[in-house]
Image (cartoon, rainbow, N blue to C red):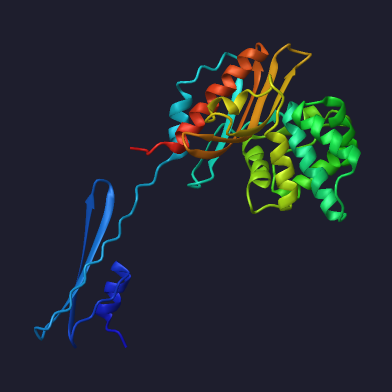
Amino acid sequence: MASPRTLACAALASVVIAGGTAGACYVQARAHSGAGVVSSAAASSTGEAAVEQVETVVEPVVDRDALLARAMAEVSVADGAEVSVAVLDLGTGERAGYGDGSFDTASIVKVDILAALLLQAQDAGRGLTVAEEAYATAMIVSSDNASASALWRAIGRAEGLDAANERFGLTATEGGDGTLWGLTRTTAADQLTLLGQVFGDDSKLSAASRTYLRELMGRIDAGQDWGVSAVADGSSWALKNGWLPRTATGLWDVNSIGRVTADGHDCLLAVLSDGNATKERGVALVEAVAGAAVRAVGASGS
């Protein structure tokens, strides 16, 4: 049975090193450039020494939310406008978020509608019909509203969307009333979760369903390829944008979600905004926030 002295060493250093029949143990801790280093050694009182040096480097923890908040302080947000963002670096697992408000989806809900349709088709053991595929292509690639309305009805409107989202892990998204799919309410964090279902491997969607959605999101019509794609390396993006002028105020909801490769980092990114004076100002805000987000997860933190 190990002696109390040996057990104490194991608890402190996570390494047990014994020499001879009477061991001596010590643990030193010292810091080097923000990293913790632990050394452990044991020596025999008989003169026969067994010495082992073990160093464990503890990397400093980087507060990505704090980095993003600092980056957001440099982004100009007009009076009355609000914005929220969530980002995940698929390579490192680093993520960050800013703002936790709820926003109208406008047309970004079209990704959610198609994901719900694909999930329902999987449950039924069938593929999409020719008509459904035509609607899906027009809805995602061209952002066709009539096609979105057709598929909104096909999935069972808000009830169908909410049921699918519960399985996808979205906890703060609520389908719009009646035919008003564009007034679905959501958060940036929920949209990041949805993107994980489309672009990740741990998904309720099959590999074929994910590939289908990704391919459509990579074919957005010219003129609609703004938003998160502004920070991408060349054409390394797949996205869906949403924009909606509010009748009561004349102000704009402008949103963008998708996957981008920026400075070698493969990221999922969701930016939501409302209260923009014009669509153009909303687009500029979304693109500035997207840049701040990818810098926050890619920064060294030093």
The quarter holding residue 49 reads bottom left
What residue is at 55 percent from the left and 37 percent from the top? 87
The C terminus - image quarter: top left
In this view, the residue farthest toward the left is 47
Q: Nearer the viewer, residue 26 or 200?
A: 200
Q: Nearer the viewer, residue 151 or 136?
A: 136
Which percent across, then down, holds residue 222? 69, 21
The quarter holding residue 215 reads top right
Q: Nearer the viewer, residue 84 or 261?
A: 261
Which percent across, then down, holds residue 189? 62, 39
> Is residue 205 visible in the rendered structure shown here?
no
Q: Is residue 269 above or below residue 128?
A: above
Q: Is residue 281 left or right of residue 27?
A: right
What residue is at 88 percent from the left and 54 percent from the top? 124
Q: Is residue 35 above or below residue 218?
A: below
Q: Is residue 278 left or right of residue 9?
A: right
> Is residue 61 visible in the rendered structure shown here?
yes
The N terminus - image quarter: bottom left
Q: Is residue 230 above or below residue 154?
A: above
